[in-house]
């Protein structure tokens, strides 16, 4: 029984079957990659997990509890954080404020009317936020407006915002897209280290096979909305079906 | 039953005005993505085009009429409009009498010009600014236009009657075989409704059947793609703004006999027209027209004596109440498209 | 100090000083000089400065922090006014219960309207608030006449059945006159006049009551801006979706913000009737809601001091500009040759007196076009110019030194 169980999920957009009978089980403390060509339904699947979309049928359970019908903030409070495919950050706020907000969410829950105490008086929050910025190597940018960061930095910031919550399950939608090679490698190291040190389960969508094979313990291949195979990285490489549907195209 | 028909009819003329203003607002919003709070001012300017023309037509000089004497026995001075000098007394009088319909010709070029100047001079610079900024700058412009009109025309209502031929009422009851006199309806309101219907039909036909209209509609749906096709969408949008201004202006011109214009009539209509646009669904032309008539008619029903007795005050609030209910139950309004102005 | 950092404390102290000495600062011209028209140190004008300041500060907590543009805030001001007058009529002529009640009733009313309106965002939210306010206005002016006094308005009267006529030092009906609102026996309209040289300064009790409350309101606003709650509100404006996926429920945050903002408006309404116990329905009309939007924008949206500046500026314009007339203009331009004098008067004429709205509209457009940050941004730009000059000089000296 995995920490995340997706059973028989279907989702249609008008005439398009974006997800067709998807089954997925993510084992606790594993790194599970979901790969597949563009338009395969990977992001749609994540949308169904975090409360952005409700599947037409099927069930999604996290630690044995259903997430369907819950609001996004409730699902996050259950311990699921997500990095989006296009960075979703607070552009008008400074970098440090961007990471402080998830700290508050983690400490105080979904709503806390603290309109009197100053933000700068919250030493614990500030320390945690500073620490995560050091971890992602952004400490020197902490007072910059997030909107003016580079694309790669925005992605790293968003990752920091998710990591600082210490989620039980971290969903990453193409975390290294748009990053330079060196940054990609840094990100791989960061994710590895976090995975090793903090018991975080990760589900990662990625087109870059270098990233996938460096991190993943299991890989699910999605094509046209349905899972094709689920295997270990070693077995995936040689798998004829996958080669046909995907790897040929990605030229690994 | 008579009451019912009467109220529907009564709602039509106000509904027409709402529909025309809302249509223009939607055109501007749909094509340019701008929320134009100065649109009511355009409606008001149209009305004042009619006022201005009738003033021009009645420009007079004084002549001494020897045939009439005042009580002291001196010859009487009378004001004679120039127009009567030029066209003869009877023809001149008729032209003056028909000032309001004639203003249509006068208002079209003026309103298009005002619209184009407004777009090129101000609105253009706000395409990329947030909606709040657009609302605010056009709101400021509306105040300015309104104050200028007030400066020149004063704060009072200016009666601008319909041509003599349209004064009086039409016995609608007799026509549909009900008791004569049960349903009477002023002629001019019939004219206003038919005129509005024609104008609305013309706008839709223009968008539907001309290449210009097709490009504009495509631009409303997806501005970037159309721009990429190498079509100069901006110029067309400027013209579209001029047309929207003209539509609002004409609605104002023809409305003057129904309600004597004053400088703040634009704002009064604007607030309701925005409600109309939102109820119809932001960006939906059909929705704007539909909602305009629906709300106009509902408003007139709510002012029935029986209804007011049952629900005191309902006539004052029915539009807003309906708007609230629709917005909460149909988030995108009656016919709204997905994804328009949602964030 | 007061749990604020150094910069905010400084700001608060400056505002406090300005407000305390306003009767002197706003009367810079001697009583009989030609420029006395520009004096603004009159009790009722100064009261309006601070009362609208409170209104705008509250509006800015909503609009400035979250970006939700309410077009119906005047409704809360109106409801607060009515509640205040009723307290003055039924309970006591002492203003304290009136002020408290105004704030509370407006708060309750904003829970209702906020709960419904906040289900939508963007322009839909604006239209919903507008619709509610227009409904309140229409009902207050018509069917609710027994409660609101209809079009004539609601005011205190001789025969009001006050339960505690002498509560907290409040006076009973005095000598057949309608009692004036007061605080522990101190009438709000009481003033102390001080004449120094050619200057005349009026220190008014009502003004100082409003001013102290305004300072408290301003202080509370600073705390809200700097609090985690304020940060969440700014995050709503920046990216509401991200906030939801970060585990925060934006709904209660928005509702709390809306209610706080509505209570500020109610407080302003309560103070208004405490100064002049008359509340009319036109106070709730959408033009009144528009006015507070203008004030906030003009001063600087989302800044602390901006709304106060904007409110002061607009109320000043309204009172002073509308008082200027042609005679006065002729006096000013008397030094010019006659033709030019008449020309100047003719040019300026449309913008003064009854035309002050035109000036306001133009000013407003100019601000939105060229200075979206309002007066505060203008101030910063000017300050920036000076700073840059200083920097330039220092680099100059450095380079000379290097040579
Ligand atoms: N909200 C939506 N409405 C309609 N169609 C949608 C919606 N979201 C996704 N789709 C469609 O569903 C299909 C799957 O999209 P999805 O974004 O899940 O693909 P993906 O696997 O993430 O691709 P990529 O690698 O490009 O990110 C696509 O054809 C997409 O156009
Ligand atoms: Mg995707």
Image (cartoon, rainbow, N blue to C red):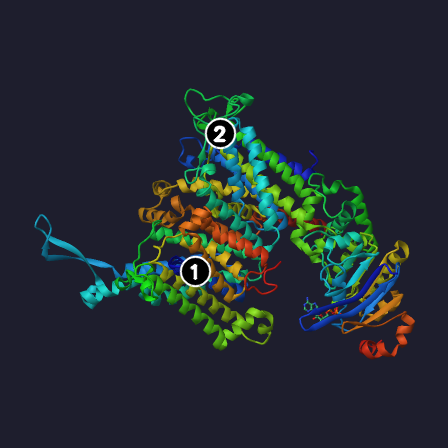
Q: Is residue A57 left or right of residue B250?
A: right
* Label 2 chain ID: C
Q: In the displayed structure, would residue C103 be above or below residue A31?
A: above
Residue shown at 42% from the left, 23% from the top = C177
Crowd tier of the residue under label 1, counting other residues whose Cα lies within 10 Å: few below 14, some 14–19, many 20 or above = many
> Which residue does the numbered mark 2 point to in the structure image?
C89
Residue shown at 38% from the left, 49% from the top = C350
Residue C255: where, in percent of width, then height? 64, 46
Asked whether the viewer can see residue A243, the reply is: yes
> Is residue A37 or residue B155 the one in the foreground?
A37
Element under label 2? helix
Q: Is residue A242 left or right of residue C13?
A: right
Check contact, mark 1 vs mark 2: CB within 8 A. Answer: no
Q: Is residue C344 left or right of residue A152?
A: left
Residue C305: where, in percent of width, then height? 59, 42
Among all residues in the image, which is located at the extreme top? C175
The N terminus of chain B, quarter of image: bottom left
Residue shown at 82% from the left, 67% from the top = A23
> Is residue A205 or residue C137 the one in the foreground?
C137
Task: Tell me the quadrant of ligand 1.
Answer: bottom right
> Is residue C369 or residue C396 the one in the foreground?
C369
Q: Quadrant of residue A196?
A: bottom right
> Which residue does the numbered mark 1 point to in the structure image?
B15
The C terminus of chain B, quarter of image: bottom right
Residue C55: where, in percent of width, then height? 55, 41
Q: Is residue C234 left or right of residue C39?
A: right
Number of labelled discs? 2
* Label 1 chain ID: B
Element under label 1? helix
Q: In the displayed structure, would residue C131 be above or below residue C188?
A: below
Crowd tier of the residue under label 2, counting other residues whose Cα lies within 10 Å: few below 14, some 14–19, many 20 or above = many
């Amino acid at each position: 029984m995995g920490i995340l169980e997706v059973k028989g999920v279907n989702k249609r957009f008008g005439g398009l079957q974006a997800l067709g009978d998807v089954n997925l089980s993510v084992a606790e403390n594993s790194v599970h990659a979901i790969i597949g060509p563009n338009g395969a339904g990977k992001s749609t699947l994540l949308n169904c997990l975090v409360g952005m979309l409700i599947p037409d049928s099927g069930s999604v359970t996290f630690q044995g509890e259903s997430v369907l019908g819950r609001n996004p903030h409730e699902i996050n409070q259950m311990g699921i954080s997500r990095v989006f495919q296009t960075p979703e950050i607070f552009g008008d706020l400074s970098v440090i404020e961007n990471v402080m907000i998830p700290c508050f969410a983690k400490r105080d829950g979904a709503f806390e009317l603290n309109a009197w105490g100053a933000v700068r008086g919250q030493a614990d929050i500030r320390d945690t936020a500073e620490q995560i910025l050091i971890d992602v190597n952004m400490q020197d940018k902490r007072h910059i407006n997030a909107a003016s960061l580079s694309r790669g930095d925005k992605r790293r910031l968003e990752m920091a915002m998710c990591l600082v919550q210490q989620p039980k399950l971290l969903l990453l939608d193409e975390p290294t897209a748009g990053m330079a090679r060196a940054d990609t490698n840094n990100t791989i190291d960061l994710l590895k280290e976090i995975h090793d040190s903090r018991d975080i389960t990760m589900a990662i969508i990625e087109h870059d096979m270098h990233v996938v094979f460096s991190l993943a313990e299991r890989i699910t291949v999605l094509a046209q909305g349905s899972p094709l195979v689920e295997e270990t990285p070693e077995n995936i490489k040689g798998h004829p079906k996958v080669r046909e549907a995907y790897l040929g195209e990605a030229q690994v | 039953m008579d009451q019912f028909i009467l109220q529907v009819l009564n709602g039509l003329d106000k509904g027409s005005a709402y529909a025309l203003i809302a249509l223009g607002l939607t055109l501007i919003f749909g094509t340019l993505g701008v929320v134009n709070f100065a649109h009511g001012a355009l409606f008001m300017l149209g009305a004042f085009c009619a006022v201005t023309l009738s003033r021009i037509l009645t420009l007079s000089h004084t002549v001494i009429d020897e045939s009439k004497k005042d009580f002291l026995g001196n010859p009487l001075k009378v004001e004679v409009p120039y127009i009567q000098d030029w066209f003869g007394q009877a023809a001149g009088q008729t032209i003056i009498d028909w000032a309001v319909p004639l203003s249509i010709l006068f208002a079209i070029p003026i309103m298009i010009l005002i619209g184009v100047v407004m777009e090129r001079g101000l609105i253009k610079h706000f395409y990329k600014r947030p909606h709040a900024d657009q609302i605010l700058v056009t709101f400021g412009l509306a105040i300015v236009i309104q104050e200028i009109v007030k400066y020149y025309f004063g704060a009072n209502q200016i009666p601008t009657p319909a041509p003599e031929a349209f004064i009086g009422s039409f016995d609608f009851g007799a026509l549909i075989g009900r008791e004569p006199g049960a349903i009477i309806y002023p002629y001019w309101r019939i004219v206003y409704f038919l005129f509005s219907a024609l104008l609305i039909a013309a706008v839709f036909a223009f968008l539907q059947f001309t290449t210009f209209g097709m490009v504009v509609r495509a631009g409303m749906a997806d501005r970037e793609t159309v721009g990429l096709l190498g079509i100069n969408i901006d110029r067309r949008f400027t013209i579209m703004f001029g047309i929207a201004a003209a539509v609002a202006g004409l609605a104002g011109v023809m409305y003057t006999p129904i309600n004597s214009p004053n400088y703040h009539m634009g704002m009064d209509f604007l607030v309701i027209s925005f409600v109309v646009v939102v109820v119809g669904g932001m960006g939906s032309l059909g929705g704007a027209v539909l909602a305009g008539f629906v709300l106009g008619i509902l408003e007139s029903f709510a002012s029935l004596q029986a209804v007011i007795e049952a629900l005191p005050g309902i006539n004052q609030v029915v539009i807003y109440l309906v708007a609230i209910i629709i917005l909460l139950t149909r988030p995108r309004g009656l016919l709204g498209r997905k994804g328009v102005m949602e964030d | 100090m007061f749990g604020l950092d150094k910069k905010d404390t400084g700001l608060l102290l400056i505002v406090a000083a300005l407000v305390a000495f306003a009767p002197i600062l706003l009367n810079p011209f001697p009583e009989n000089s030609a420029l006395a028209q520009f004096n603004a140190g009159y009790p009722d004008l100064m009261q309006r400065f601070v009362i609208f300041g409170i209104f705008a500060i509250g509006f800015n907590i909503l609009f400035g922090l979250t970006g939700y543009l309410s077009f119906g805030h005047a409704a809360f001001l109106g409801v607060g006014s009515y509640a205040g007058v009723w307290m003055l009529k039924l309970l006591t002529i002492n203003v304290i219960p009136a002020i408290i009640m105004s704030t509370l009733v407006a708060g309750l009313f904003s829970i209702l309207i906020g709960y419904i309106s906040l289900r939508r965002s963007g322009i839909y939210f604006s239209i919903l608030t507008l619709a509610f306010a227009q409904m309140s206005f229409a009902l207050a002016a018509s069917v609710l006449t027994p409660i609101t006094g209809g079009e004539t308005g609601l005011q205190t009267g001789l025969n009001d059945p006050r339960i505690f006529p002498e509560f907290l030092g409040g006076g009973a009906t005095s000598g057949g006159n309608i009692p004036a609102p007061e605080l522990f026996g101190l009438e709000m309209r009481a003033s102390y006049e001080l004449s120094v040289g050619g200057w005349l300064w009026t220190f008014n009790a009502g003004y100082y009551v409003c001013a102290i409350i305004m300072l408290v309101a301003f202080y509370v606003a600073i705390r809200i801006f700097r609090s985690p709650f304020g940060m969440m509100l700014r995050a709503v404006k920046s990216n509401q979706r991200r906030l939801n996926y970060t585990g925060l429920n934006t709904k209660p945050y928005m509702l709390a913000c809306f209610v706080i903002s509505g209570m500020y408006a109610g407080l302003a309404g309560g103070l208004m009737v405490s100064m002049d116990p008359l509340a009319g329905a036109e106070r709730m009309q959408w033009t009144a809601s528009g006015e507070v939007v203008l004030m906030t924008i003009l001063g600087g949206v989302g800044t602390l001091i901006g709304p106060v500046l904007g409110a002061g500026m607009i109320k000043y314009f309204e009172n002073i500009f509308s008082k200027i007339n042609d005679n006065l203009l002729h006096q000013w331009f008397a030094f010019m040759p006659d033709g030019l004098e008449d020309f100047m008067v003719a040019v300026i004429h449309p913008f003064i007196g009854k035309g002050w709205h035109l000036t306001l509209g133009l000013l407003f457009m100019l601000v939105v076009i060229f200075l979206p940050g309002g007066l505060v941004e203008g101030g910063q730009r000017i300050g920036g110019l000076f700073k840059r000059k200083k920097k330039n000089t220092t680099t100059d000296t450095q380079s000379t030194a290097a040579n």
